Amino acid sequence: MIRFSQVGKRYPPGLDALSGISFEVNAGELVLIEGHSGAGKSTVLKLIAAMEHPTAGTVLVNNQNVGAMKRAAVPYLRRNLGLVLQDQKLLFDRTSFENVLLPLSIAGFPAREAASRARAALDKVGLLKREKALPVSLSGGEQQRLAIARAVVNRPKLLLADEPTAHLDPHTARDVARIFHDFHQVGVTVLIATYDDALFNLDGARRLVFDHGRLAP
């Protein structure tokens, strides 16, 4: 499903975020991307989602070379993946329901089907009763769960998350970790960049450990 072949990523003025990275992820796997701050974890996810392009090597997602993908093709790639970033980019002038509904509206889903999917996603993360709430009235944990609902509303086959439990209290962090485990249990391929390997110490999880832009043996 995902293949990195000798991938490098260099940022100006010559900072190597990744060097010679090679690995594969099969469909249905749960993979934890671990390492210190600045190890390259976020860069890996951004390359998969075509938010960044490699400066060396090849990144394949579903046999598509995402580094060579034309800009017009990127939205079609992202229809099959969900992305949870550290910066949640929630729309604070819209309700929880409207935030989750937005990706489906952009994709042209019929209104009734879009509304049904949005409520199902909110229900999955325990926020259905808060569908009319504005994000500013939600706790930090609820905002994170709202971001997850928006990421999975299109029922992606691939779910990417960048430090999804950062800044959450231990109880809320465990709840969020459990949500990702539930998606993996129903066959979604899940990649999580995290500093807290104990929190995501889940059965069947595979670990990729990064150290200063290189994959540890």
Image (spheres, grey):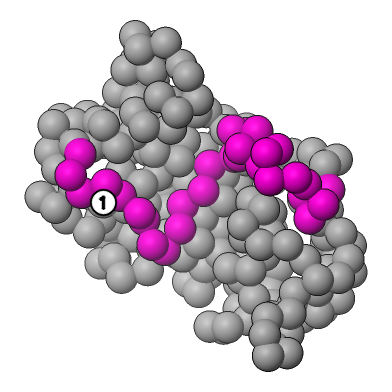
Identify the element where label 1 is drawn.
Answer: helix
User: Callout 1, which amino acid?
Assistant: Gln
Is 77 left, or right, of 156 in this rendering? right
Is residue 68 inside the magenta stretch?
yes
Q: Nearer the viewer, residue 180 or 146?
A: 146
Q: Is residue 1 left or right of residue 81?
A: right
Taking the spot 46% from the left edge, 65% from the top edge, the residue there is 163
Q: Dot 1: few (<14), some (14–19), or many (≥20) neighbours within 10 Å?
A: some
184 vs 32: above or below: above
State the extent of the magenta-drawn residues as a range.
65-94
**Which x, y percent locates residue 195?**
50, 74
Task: Look at the image and tell me in which quarter the C terminus lies.
Answer: bottom right
Residue 86 vs 143, above or below: the answer is below
Image coords of residue 118 (percent x, y): 34, 25
User: Relative to the observer, which residue lies in front, 63 or 15?
Assistant: 15
Find residue 5 and report its horizontal and vertical position in percent. 89, 62
Q: For the point 30% across and 43% down, which residue is it?
A: 146
Can residue 174 be seen here? The reply is no
The residue to which callout 1 is attached is 143
Task: Judge whether 147 appears above or below 198 on screen.
Answer: above
- Is 111 in front, or is 200? 111
Q: Is residue 10 above or below residue 62?
A: below
- Figure quadrant of residue 32: bottom right
Q: Is residue 179 left or right of residue 216?
A: left
Residue 180 in sight here: yes
Name the residue: 37% across, 38% down. Answer: 149
**The N terminus: image quadrant:** top right
- On the image, the x and y values in percent for residue 50 come to 67, 53
